[in-house]
Image (tube, helix red, strand yellow):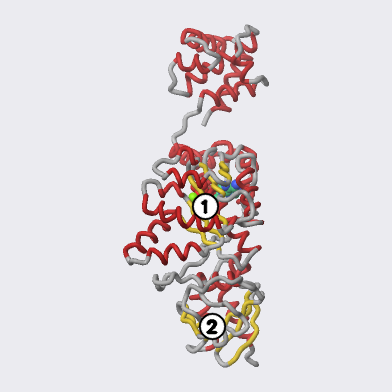
Amino acid sequence: MEVTAQSVWDNCLDFIKDNIQPQAFKTWFEPIKAVKLSGSALSIQVPSKFFYEWLEEHYVKILKVALTKELGEDAKLVYVIKMENTYGNRQPFTEKIPSSNRTAVKSQDVDVPFDNKSPELKNPFIIPGIRNVKIESQLNPSYNFENFLEGDSNRLARNAGIAVANKPGGTSFNPLLIFGGVGLGKTHLAHAIGVDIKDKYPEKTVLYISAEKFTQQYIDSVKKNNRNDFIHFYQIIDVLIIDDVQFLSGKTGTQDVFFHIFNHLHQNGKQVVLTSDKAPVDMQDIEQRLLSRFKWGLSAELQTPDFETRVSILKNKLYRDGVEMPEEIVEYVAKHIKTNVRELEGAIISLIAQSSFNKKEITINLAKDIVEKFVKNTKREVSIDYIQKVVSDYFQMDVSTLQSKTRKRHIVQARQLAMFFAKKYTKASLASIGSQIGQRDHATVLHACKTVDNLSSTDKQFRKYVEDLSKKLSL
Ligand code: ADP
Ligand code: MG
């Protein structure tokens, strides 16, 4: 059989396919076309510069193995970038490559001679002076907007992210600061913005970096005496995404350098995206001038998702993993894990794993066991506010009605039940419960608890209320 670029590449693909995730294969290998075979050099066409960088960063080893199997030790891979991009008049900041005569540049394991047709195809991610540090976008394509489900809790942040991705540097959301508690999706959203920008504007230089890594790089640059190169490198980035900026607190040197980088980028219409576990007002030990910059654009909060959103997140996860699970179990998990999406996903993954390893059916009881483990770790207490909300909902009244001074019997009962459960499920004192449930005193709360005890042993209907509410409130 004749050996052609196509046949060599097909064989490589067979090998690669067996060795990586199907989704990754689809994303990164299916779009590639084999275009030329000359001697032991195979030319493949990739859709963008980003694509090439990604392949180089993540798949260079497997490409080398596959290609060597097909073409022997001298195998070479040549990338041809399909899009004819003009990269603007950006200053070169690595060693100059003569424009007519591209030299081969050693890139990790595979020699990548640059094809004549692809101007600018040199590796730009080498910090001058910090040799052998190859920086690429560091984006995780599995964090995208599509699988970041929208709900009330994240609508503002998600949509601001989309707006920024559509017009990086061109909206008033600059910087875009996304803040919120752990496991609520800050990192996911930060990546999604970068991934979407790379998709829409492949020529833009996007960099995702954690504040911790940024700090480390800065410290290294000071040690190696090339602080200016460090700054210069960051100043040529089009979209800079820094995750967990609260990490910069107390680190004045890094804050100082970031301040200069930020100003430069902002003045030049470049986009900055930041995440933090706190709102700017609550950030400690961050210089005032930096804090004020953080507030220039938009600060969007990620809140804890409501029940519906939690259910959608779970269903989406199950759907993507191709797992079916009874509705009531999904709802059970969503109902009990409330404060952290990572834990929510963790519980569902444990559930799938438990059932498949132990060949157990996924039942409510199994779900209970697993959820309990997750919930125990987070040690949560229901709040008095929550109890009032649940009780009012149950009796279809507003919380303000429940708290009001009225003596109508069903309202008094609802109020007494709220007090009873507050005593039972929280560590709050009688006085504190009274003051939170309509400004009553401790004697009223004590009386309420006794009344509920009495009524539930004498009144069948009332006992049903207590049972129903216990179920709703039980963890
Ligand atoms: P943070 O950085 O705020 O601690 P992450 O971004 O790491 O949180 O999110 C934790 C996990 O929850 C990730 O696996 C992420 O994909 C998932 N997640 C968070 N919010 C959502 C959402 N709205 N839709 C889908 N997955 C989400
Ligand atoms: Mg994070």
Q: How dense is the environment of label 1, judged by Cα within 10 Å: few (below 14), some, or many (20 and up)?
A: few
Residue at the spot 52% in from the left edge and 23% down from the top edge: 384
Q: Is 135 displayed left or right of 465 in the figure? A: left
Residue 464, quarter of picture:
top right
Residue reaching furthest to the left: 223
Whether residue 5 is visible here, answered yes or no, is yes
Q: Position of residue 365 (x, y in %)?
A: 54, 39
Q: Position of residue 432 (x, y in %)?
A: 46, 17
Give amino acid for label 1. Answer: Ala
Judged from the image, the secondary structure of the residue bearing numbered disc 2 is helix
Residue reaching furthest to the front: 267
Q: Is 231 displayed left or right of 239 in the figure? A: left
Closer to the camera in the image, 258 or 160: 258
Judged from the image, the secondary structure of the residue bearing numbered disc 1 is helix
| Number of numbered tags placed on the structure image | 2
Q: Quadrant of the N terminus?
A: bottom right
Q: Position of residue 444 (x, y in %)?
A: 50, 8
Q: CA distance from mark 1 to mark 2?
A: 36 Å
Whether residue 355 is visible here, answered yes or no, is no
Closer to the camera in the image, 381 or 318: 381
For disc 2, the marked residue is 67
For disc 1, the marked residue is 353
